[in-house]
Amino acid sequence: MTTTVAGTAYDRLLNLHQEGSLLGSTAEILSWDQETMMPSGGLEYRSRQMALLARLSHERRTDPRLEELLNEAEAEGHAEDSPEHAQIREIRRDYEMATRLPADLVEEFAKLSSVSQHVWADARKNSDFQAFKPHLEQLVELSRRKADCLGIPEGGERWDALADTYEPGMRASEVAAVFEPLRDRLSNLIKELGASSNGPSNAFNEATIEIDAQSTFVREIATAFGFDFERGRLDRSVHPFCGGSHCNDVRLTTRFQPTEFNDALGSTMHEAGHGLYEQGLPFSMVGLPLGEAISLGIHESQSRMWENQVGRSEAFWKWCAPRAKEKIGAPLAHLSFEDFYGGANIVRPGFIRVEADEATYNLHIMIRFELERAIIGGDLAVADIPGEWNRMYKDYLGLDVPEDRVGCLQDVHWSMGAMGYFPTYTLGNLYCAQFFNTACEQIPGLEDGFSRGEFAPLLDWLRENIHRHGRRYSASELCLKVTGRPLSSDPLVDYLENKLRPLYGI
Amino acid sequence: MTTTVAGTAYDRLLNLHQEGSLLGSTAEILSWDQETMMPSGGLEYRSRQMALLARLSHERRTDPRLEELLNEAEAEGHAEDSPEHAQIREIRRDYEMATRLPADLVEEFAKLSSVSQHVWADARKNSDFQAFKPHLEQLVELSRRKADCLGIPEGGERWDALADTYEPGMRASEVAAVFEPLRDRLSNLIKELGASSNGPSNAFNEATIEIDAQSTFVREIATAFGFDFERGRLDRSVHPFCGGSHCNDVRLTTRFQPTEFNDALGSTMHEAGHGLYEQGLPFSMVGLPLGEAISLGIHESQSRMWENQVGRSEAFWKWCAPRAKEKIGAPLAHLSFEDFYGGANIVRPGFIRVEADEATYNLHIMIRFELERAIIGGDLAVADIPGEWNRMYKDYLGLDVPEDRVGCLQDVHWSMGAMGYFPTYTLGNLYCAQFFNTACEQIPGLEDGFSRGEFAPLLDWLRENIHRHGRRYSASELCLKVTGRPLSSDPLVDYLENKLRPLYGI
């Protein structure tokens, strides 16, 4: 684990990179601890610990010896299709990303976004966009400078440089090319469903269930999916997340409310999906690109697959509904199979992204994408966001936004300066549907197996085709390699239409 | 928190020292996590994270800039009785301790002790001292070298240099001077109690109580003692300990068995005592000597006070017994006050230190002290340990040790190379009894208040007289300052005689 003079430049490069990762993974454990375990009094000192780790970690990620070793390792002539080549390419990428931003810009950004998050939180509470506006204007300005430092790809735009930090290689023009047909078909589907008077019953979502019983049940589901509790945990937190430090220590959290069993279940399946990806990364590559997830979009494709393609499927509920009735008893005793399966699949346009169902969710994302692309591109003034937001919600979702609190002020992302992040959610859904189609083609009886609690064939397929590669391939390369086709919106909408129309009696 | 050029040398010294502490405190959170939360699969990578943090932390503690700043700060002429003077003195001490050991010795020691612990664990299981002997011989040899590097105090012996790392300034000759009268009076007391046929009932220790109920109850006791759960936690672990990272994030653990309520209660009160000391250290001095505990002995004086002087007192049980009956119900319903108070105070010589009662415990320690002093001093060969051990157990405790597994192989300490550590346990008991005597003199009705659940007067007194000072005074200075007398064995034996004789009808 220490830097040795022996070995090839490639070996020494890996050693040096891994040491930097060790500090990063330490910070990840402290982050998890902060959200789940730390007493409130610990916050002030924890922020000092985190700041030091961030500084030391940045020093290592920008260590000039990395540049030297990269040059030497590149000159060693590793074959283009070798893992070594991919490893060097990705370490180069990380190094470039870390060194391109000048320290003063990073610091200015960190300060502004820290203040802006507080201002945003108050502005949201008071539904007061004007209070947030000057900060958002500064964040946009700084984001543009950041994009210029990171480097705009040839033929691309500033937004691309920002999005690249979350979804390497993704461009606004490509996102738009996939989102546009998706938007049209999805809007139509949602209108169709909304017009139906034969929607599913909401009875499942109205049941009140003891939190201990919910907790035991969701843990069993995560176990059934293949989440390895010898190499992971499941705890509670205010906002569910998947943390931890590496593939052998993956930490999921979920949340519980007595009347929100479906939310706890969905959140757990979602985070377990992230966790299964993390547990599937190779420990031999820990702390190296080939031991890391490709992108936020690919990560999300894994969480969504277990949450939606598995966890909202008819086959899954054939297995899950009787188990839930058996384990939880009275509160669910009166429900039919249709109540469970239908209740998990209700589509209802609403104002709030994080409460959205599987279908309307993507429209929330598209609105944010179009807005932030226009803002960063200079085609929309920050002052005009609320008007545009409300117009689009009317247009896409048929909703009249009553106030900015439930409109353009609802999400934290922009106040953190995270521009280019939102689309990764829908990209995840798209990759997910396309991967799942291929899995179904390649594994006979895959979905049918869910009705018998057989989830291992899917997990094995994901391990083999996606997880074990780490960052060896880019997201688009992986998509082509696994599915034989570039990313398309058709698999997702086909899947939604095929499932939802019958549930709505269409 | 970062090193600035501005300010006095003293200020810069504090900044630099605090940064080193930040890394150490990060490692402490990871340690706690490892014992309580980490999935077993995380161990391998965690050991790499810990090794890196240890290395970075050592680099900072031996940073040559510390030496420069120490020289400059010492030249600033801070008054001898000022906090600044104490701060500099203690940073100097830490720096000297960190720099005196050559890196190759530290590494050799770490490797040997790591291997020796495994060998010892097997040797204990098989009661095979011969298997452990060669490793212990090497550890003794290395410990002697370590002592020579650390520096033997004038007129002292090698053991002193080793003990100094746990109990600064303590010498074998002083320990022996206090332990000898203690041993004589204690042996007599234990013989007296053993000869009595009117000992307390064991009924309390035979009750079976649900672990959830135990857990809720011990948490309430910790709260009643004043442990602040906004600045701390209580969890379960195999071996109870007090961890965390600083005064606002103190993490206790305890253990539960259905039939060992008294053990869970005692362990919790003990660890809460450590935790109350930690929470009483000043946050303004976090990461600095004046924000740290003085020594293991003084730390132990705090844990023992809440476990014994409070938690095994008649007054405490007047308050606790009815509460325990009320909260826990049926399993305790048949017990009288005498069953609780007596059951918490049974004295019974046994082979195992960690299972020993409040009185015999100290004899276990004295045996270890005398043996390790002789081994390090060259007056006893490692090969002769079992024989000497067994002879002393017969002599001090009247027991015939049947096998080394429950004899000289029972404790992990020597296999870790921790020579000079054991006496801090009994020094803690001695400081504790002497401090508590003074507290009783200075606070009218102190013990009586325990019977009404009034523990704040004791905590306030400890905060004022001990906790808030950090490492400003040495243990012996503090003892003199607080109690007006040097450390003596009388308060401890007086306390034990006064409590135990009546309980045994003497």
Image (spheres, coloured by chain):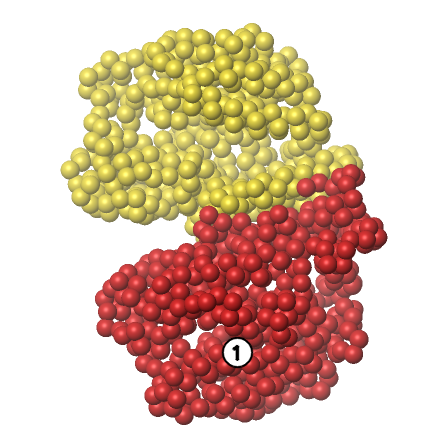
Chain colours: A red, B yellow
Residue A166: tell me if it is visible.
no
SS for dot 1:
helix
Query: Which residue position holds label 1?
Result: A492
Q: Quadrant of residue B442?
A: top left
Question: Measuring 31% from the left and 16% from the top, which residue is drawn there?
Answer: B190
Tell me if A322 is positioned left or right of A379 in this view.
Answer: left
Q: Position of residue A55 (x, y in %)?
A: 70, 53
Residue B230: tell me if it is visible.
yes
**Mark 1, chain letter?**
A
Q: Amino acid at mark 1?
A: Leu
Front position in the image: B166 or B8: B166
Q: Position of residue A247 (x, y in %)?
A: 55, 52
Tell me if A370 is positioned left or right of A126 in this view.
Answer: right
Front position in the image: A449 or A38: A449
Tell me if B379 is positioned left or right of A64 in this view.
Answer: left
Q: Position of residue B125 (x, y in %)?
A: 42, 23
Question: Measuring 51% from the left and 17% from the top, which residue is drawn there?
Answer: B131
Instruction: Give the vertical position of B199 relative to A153 (above or below).
Output: above
Front position in the image: B346 or A391: A391
Q: Position of residue A71 (x, y in %)?
A: 83, 53
